[in-house]
Image (tube, helix red, strand yellow):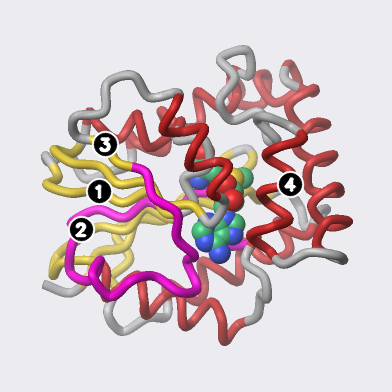
Amino acid sequence: MIWDLFLCVFDIRFWIRSARSDAQLQRLRSEHDNAQSLNLLYQERKDPWGLDSPHFRYQQSKYSRMLSLLPSRRYKRALDLGCGLGTLTRRLRSHADEVVGIDVSDVAVAQATRETTEQSNLQFQQGDALNLSRELDNGFDLVVIADTLYYLSPLSDEVLQTVRERVAQLLMPGGILLLVNHFTVNLDPGSRWSPKIHRIFRSARDFTTVHESWRPFYLASIFQKSP
Ligand SMILES: C[S@@+](CC[C@H](N)C(=O)[O-])C[C@H]1O[C@@H](n2cnc3c(N)ncnc32)[C@H](O)[C@@H]1O
């Protein structure tokens, strides 16, 4: 915990960069739809949230901690929904035989594909969490959704419930969902939504809550789909 806090302060430029990108995304959304806005953001700032930068040790340590929460087993097929540049997706290869990363931004997907040298068990594709292909159903024993759902547009309780139902359909019976969302103290729009997002997933009949934790500065939950 103390180490996490130290890294947070040390990586102050990481937080400034994220806040600037969020502000720019807000501006872009006043003129473009969600996918176009994210594409423009990825074009202008190669790594808008600094997630792919090894210099930001807070984020890299957060990925390690998140993945350490997973029930330890070998997964057959994992999905990283809202994969961005694929930093977390690539890490999932040490947990699963096959990994798929999906992001609404085709600019991010193209960049993630370019930056992945060893792709034998890894695939990136463009897709919208609000309109995922039925071909994906029942296809994963692990789904990871990290810092993505508060970027949905439009964002409402009803939309989140729909996404929750869709995620349950993507999972095989007994499959695991790792849900992570940035959370400070309701200072920013993402943080204001995060507790609600986790509450909505927790209240699903299809899911059992296996683990929940708060760390500086995110909420992490592990859910299991009913066997
Ligand atoms: C802050 S980034 C997180 C990336 C990645 N999950 C990680 O933690 O490294 C949020 C990502 O969500 C994606 N995103 C936003 N809305 C989405 C949607 N409706 N469907 C799929 N991806 C979406 C964005 O394009 C962006 O890449």
Magenta stretch: includes residue 144? yes
Query: What's the mark number on residue 78?
Result: 1
Give the percent coordinates (x, y) of residue 112.
46, 33
Give the numbered dot on residue 109. Answer: none
Q: How many marks?
A: 4
For numbered disc 3, what is the local secondary structure? strand
Q: Earlier in the sequence, mark 3 or mark 4?
A: 4
Mark 2, other Cα within 10 Å: few <14 / some 14–19 / many ≥20: many
Label 4 to label 1: alpha-carbon separation = 28 Å
Task: Check whether the beta carbons of the residues at disc 3 and disc 1 lie within 8 A of each other.
Answer: no
Taking the spot 79% from the left edge, 23% from the top edge, the residue there is: 12
Q: Which residue is mark 2?
A: 140
Does the beta carbon of the residue at mark 3 sit less than 8 Å from ligand 1?
no
Give the residue pinned by disc 4.
40
Label 4 and label 2: CA atoms lie apart by: 30 Å
Disc 2 marks which amino acid?
A: Phe
Q: Quadrant of residue 117?
A: top left
**Residue 152 falls left or right of residue 92:** right
Tag 2's secondary structure?
strand
Asked whether disc 3 touches disc 2, contact meaning CB atoms under 8 Å apart, the reply is no
The one nearer the camera, 123 or 187, is 123
